[in-house]
């Protein structure tokens, strides 16, 4: 229920706890996990692997079914 607005507006299948992948403009790839929403109605909060805190990411910048993205240990 945390991301209902994002799901409806952007048409993405985002869920808390889901593994995602972001590819930035420099073609580097970052994997992470969707965490509970804090602010920014149009953004998805992602805690990238190896990081302590989450950051807001635009929903269309994420791959919601990344192949090879495994849970971080």
Image: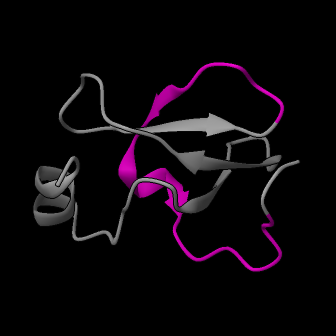
In the visual, does 47 lie left or right of 41? right
Residue at left 20%, top 63%? 7
Residue at left 83%, top 46%? 28
**Viewer-side residue, 4 vs 58:** 4
Q: x%, y% of residue 63?
A: 56, 66
Asked if residue 30 is among those painted magenta in the image, a careful observer would answer no
In the visual, does 57 lie left or right of 65? left
Residue 36 against residue 6 in the figure, above or below = above
Residue at left 11%, top 51%? 5
Q: x%, y% of residue 15?
A: 37, 61
Residue 42 against residue 71 in the figure, above or below = above
Asked if residue 62 is among those painted magenta in the image, a careful observer would answer yes
Residue 47's image quarter?
A: top right
Stretch in magenta? 50-70
* Residue sitting farthest toward the front: 73
**Viewer-side residue, 57 vs 27:** 57
In the visual, does 38 lie left or right of 70? left
Residue 17 against residue 13 in the figure, above or below = above
Work out which quarter of the rendered image holds the N terminus and state it: bottom left
């Amino acid at each position: 229920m945390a991301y209902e607005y994002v799901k409806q507006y952007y048409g993405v299948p985002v869920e808390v706890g889901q593994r995602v992948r972001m590819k930035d403009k420099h073609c580097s790839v970052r994997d992470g996990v969707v965490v509970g929403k804090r602010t920014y109605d149009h953004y998805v909060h992602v805690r990238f692997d190896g990081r302590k805190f989450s950051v807001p990411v635009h929903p269309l910048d994420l791959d919601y079914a990344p192949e090879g993205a495994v849970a971080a240990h």
